[in-house]
Amino acid sequence: MKQSVEDELEEILFTADIGVQTSERLLERVTENLRDKGDGKAAMALLKEEIRAILKTCEKPFELGPERPQIILTLGVNGAGKTTTLGKLAAKLTNEGKKVLLIAGDTFRAAAIEQLEEWAQRSGCEIYRKNQGADPSGTIFDGIKYAVENGFDVALADTAGRLHNKKDLIEELKKIDRVSGKAMAGAPHQVLLVLDATNGQNALMQAKEFGEAIPCSGIILTKLDGTAKGGVIIGICEELKKPVHFVGIGETVEDLRPFNADEFLEALFLEE
């Protein structure tokens, strides 16, 4: 039995990991505007334009604000690639001539501190760290003070990966947010949420929960080099309307790339 155009589009959307609610809204818009209900090519073209319009609203280059030092906090669940992404961002900014400080605020995981130290050495930036087990809020507070006193352009603060549904750990994030403001008025100036593309629709829930704890200013989507389609970012763009600054497609600094809506759309439907 031959599939209808609507069924074909629905299958494409679910394969791209776009999610039920966003897929249904997209299908509704396409079918409303499609003159010939049996024209698959026209339907596909309309679908892509609808998705492009959503993605374009989130396409925003990463920029530093006027504050010096610019304090940037990163959030994310365990294993999202947050520490590595932070190291890549530090290397990018250092290459642009900025004086960068990495703050090792993930004091629970010894490997996180070691990873940041390695990135600091590779990129030629400094790191502020304490021993494993130190209070994360205190570490970030002291790190920000150090950045202010020593004339840094940017301070990038790592935080421990945590599940978005663990209330005590989310409360700790709120504390980190508060003490940042005490260390420097207005800090953090940016809050970047790092999401793992392989988490699919769970990434949307993570974005919502983290956003309720600390409103994020931008998103970085990692691990698009694997099997992940990353279609979840469409739902995140549509529902949360937050800028997507970067996508991660590999392990090197060059693999942290500015988010481009047209390129992302092309990759999303590459097999179609």
Image (cartoon, rainbow, N blue to C red):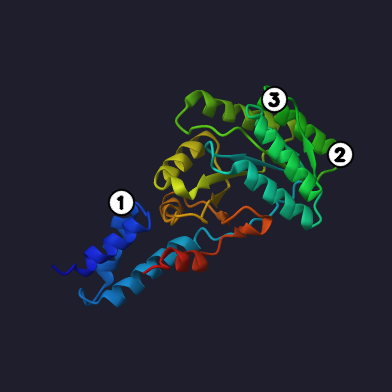
Question: What residue is at 66 percent from the left and 35 percent from the top?
Answer: 112
Question: What residue is at 71 percent from the left and 31 percent from the top?
Answer: 140
Which residue is labeled 3 in the image?
Answer: 132
Residue type marked 1: Val
Whole-angstrom CA distance, mark 3 to mark 2, is 24 Å
SS at badge 2: loop
Give residue 150's quadrant in the image: top right
Which residue is labeled 2 in the image?
Answer: 150
Residue type marked 2: Asn
SS at badge 3: loop
Residue type marked 3: Gln
66 and 149: which is toward the camera: 149
Disc 3 residue crowd, few under 14, some 14–19, many 20+, Cα 10 Å: some
Whole-angstrom CA distance, mark 2 to mark 1, is 50 Å
Q: Is residue 186 visible?
A: no
| N-term-proximal mark, 2 vs 1 | 1
Question: Closer to the camera: disc 3 or disc 2?
Answer: 3
SS at badge 1: helix
**Quadrant of the frame with the C terminus:** bottom left
Q: Is residue 162 visible?
A: yes
- On residue 20, which mark appears? 1
- On residue 204, which mark appears? none
Question: Closer to the camera: disc 3 or disc 1?
Answer: 3
| N-term-proximal mark, 3 vs 1 | 1
